Image: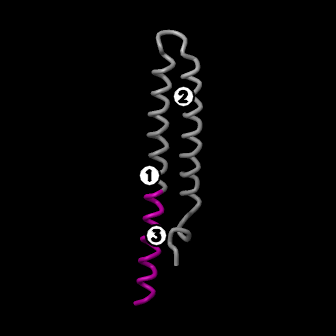
Amino acid sequence: MNLQQTVRSSITVIFRLAALITAVLFGLFSLMSFFSNDYGNDGIFNGIVFLVSGGLTAAFFMFMAVVIELKEATLVELRQLNEKE
């Protein structure tokens, strides 16, 4: 039995979607900042800031999804062990 498919709950899907949406939005923000490089190379700096902050935020959402999935998988395995005894 594949536990990876059975323990995916709605909250982990929401966290994964939040990570995807965050990565796409911050990627678009960074592209807009790179293209609006008008005075003193502020666009390059802001683009790099958007890339770093978007990457960290998306990584945080993915980390939360993985932690919740691991906890749910552990609970499923513990329930199976209790049923065998």
Q: Name the residue under label 1.
A: 63
The answer to whether 79 appears left or right of 24 in the picture is: left
Can you tell which quarter of the image residue 36 is in? Answer: top right
> Is residue 67 a member of the stretch shown in magenta?
yes
Of discs 2 and 3, which sits in the foreground?
2
What is the magenta range?
66-85
Task: Note whether 42 is above or below 22 in the view shown.
Answer: above
Q: How crowded is mark 1: few (under 14 residues within 10 Å), some or many (20 or more)?
A: some
Residue 30 is labelled as 2
Q: In which quarter of the image is the C terminus?
A: bottom left
The residue identified by callout 3 is: 73
Residue at point 51%, 18% (across, down): 43
Q: Residue at (43%, 76%) from the top-left corner?
A: 77
Mark 3 residue element: helix
Dot 1: what SS?
helix
Spot occupied by residue 44 in the image (x, y as percentages of width and height): 48, 21
* Earlier-in-chain disc, 1 versus 3: 1
Q: Distance between the residues labelled 1 and 3?
A: 15 Å
The residue type indicated by label 3 comes to Ala
Picture coordinates of residue 47 (x, y %)? 50, 25
**Residue 19 x/y as whole percent:** 53, 46
Give the Cα distance between marks 2 and 1: 23 Å
Say what amino acid the circle numbered 1 marks: Phe
Nearer the observer: mark 2 or 1; the answer is 2
**2 and 3 marks in contact (CB < 8 Å):** no
Q: How is the image coloured?
A: one colour
Answer with mark 2 or mark 1, whichever residue precedes in sequence: 2
Circles 2 and 1: CB atoms closer than 8 Å: no
User: Which three-letter amino acid code belongs to the residue tagged 2?
Assistant: Ser
| Residue sitting at x 49%, y 55% | 65
